Amino acid sequence: MEKILITGNGPLRGEVSIAGAKNAALPIIAASLLTNEPLQVSNIPAVRDISTALKLLELLGCQVERNDTELAIDSSQVHSVRAPYELVKTMRGSILLLGPLLARFGEADVSLPGGCAIGSRPVNEHIAGLEAMGAEVNIEAGYIKAAARRLRGAHFAFDVPSVTATENLMMAASLAEGTTVLENCAMEPEVGDLAKLLAAMGAGIEGAGTSTITIEGSERLNGTSHRVPPDRIETGTFLVAAAATRGDVRVVNTEPDFLHHVLGKLEQAGARLQIGPDWIHLDTDGKRCQAVNIHTAPYPAFPTDMQAQFMALNALSEGSATVVENIFENRFMHVAELQRMGADIELQGHTAIVRGRERLQGAPVMATDLRASASLVIAGLAADGDTTVDRVYHLDRGYANIDSKLAELGAVIRRI
Ligand code: EPU
């Protein structure tokens, strides 16, 4: 199994270009199932979750052509509505196929994703929303079996604002009969991006990016072309890596507007930021950062997907801070690994108390999930000596060429 070997060697410096957002691309790919016309997508990131999503589409009968960051999907010949456990278990985002399959083909058979390293991650909101739209949903032998002759518009309020459940119901509602009003929706930028695509496909959709979304269903949707927006979490990850190594890095091809909270925390930590329309320049002036308190919450607040990276930064900063995880119940698996590198972190339920250390030591560590892996890489870049990060496949699920991008910024990093 591949590992990443990092030899800590001081500040990252230079320029790095950000790829398209994995979590925006996944619903776009799922939405291709809503039409029998081709969908062209650009700025597709070279990450494993996208390959998994495309493998799933091919299993269903879609024609997929991928050329670097360009993608064409033709869903006119779909012959199956079954998303099997073997693929779904490797990527929970597969649940995004449920809404589009059911809406277009009147049935869907999608494996339950099961537990994962950051918590139990239920799918009850997805199911309740589809039931409100008239679907009959049963769980049989580990699969969600859903059926509906034609979904009908409904008024549905989420108990918790779930990103993929909001996206699933928006897609389903776009082919439903009548109007759907969704309340307490997730407001993440990826939801707004999906709404843009659905509108271009012919759906009437209003309010995406706010907590209430109204969707006017159509009998059929058309193909279109779409560009995936930049990855806000990859952007944040490189900025934190720059801050942790006391570096000076310019991140380009990004969207600073999606990152207000994260950028605010970096400034609070003492980093100097300059921000342009599609770039962010972070400079620490060679200084160590100050630890900052973090409290994860749905967008526009601080994203759970940046919590682990800030934990690594805090572990290397001056002073102490608390990190509170409010979205997932078990998203602290990186703490024990950071402790192996000498980090001083105390866990009390959903709160981690981090006391910054001047230095961490390189050590063999194990990645447990995507963002946890990123935090271990950041710690390794700033630590003394060698760090090997095992189970690198977690990293490859969501970061495109992270090792070569870091090497270009001066890191000593390679796969073994
Ligand atoms: N929840 C429920 N019931 C549901 C769905 C969600 O109780 O039916 C709860 C979850 O347990 C959690 C909260 O709602 O406590 C929010 O979870 P959400 O459903 O929003 O997460 P998700 O849609 O499964 C997406 C991203 C995650 C990201 C979260 C939160 C995709 C494909 N995944 O997941 O990304 O952490 O939103 O922002 O968009 C990652 O990229 O590393 C990643 C995990």
Image (cartoon, rainbow, N blue to C red):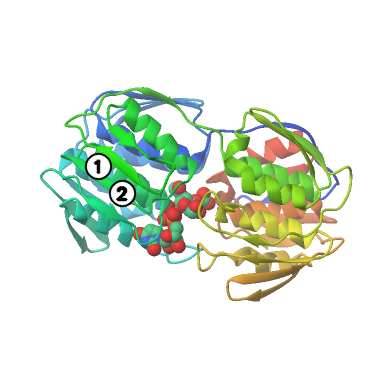
Which badge, 1 or 2, is on the more N-terminal residue? 1
Q: Which residue has dot 2 on it?
A: 182
Label 2 neighbour load within 10 Å: few <14, some 14-19, many 20+: many
The quadrant of the rendered image in which ligand 1 is seen is bottom left
Is residue 80 visible to the viewer in this orientation of the structure? no
- Given the current orientation, which residue lies at the most extreme bottom position? 348
Decide if ligand 1 comes within 8 Å of the CB at mark 1. Answer: no
Residue placed farthest to the left in the image?
149
What is the three-letter code of the residue carrying label 2?
A: Leu
Helix, strand or loop at label 1? It is: helix
- Measured along the vertical axis of the image, is residue 104 above or below residue 270? above
| Residue at 39%, 56% in the rendered image | 89
Q: Where does the image place residue 181, in percent across and percent down from the top left?
A: 27, 46
Q: Secondary structure at mark 2?
A: strand
Q: Pinpoint residue 295: horizontal percent, then vertical percent.
A: 61, 61
| Residue 203, quarter of the rendered image | top left
Q: Which of labels 1 and 2 is toward the front?
A: 2
Residue contact at pointers 1 and 2, CB within 8 angstroms: yes
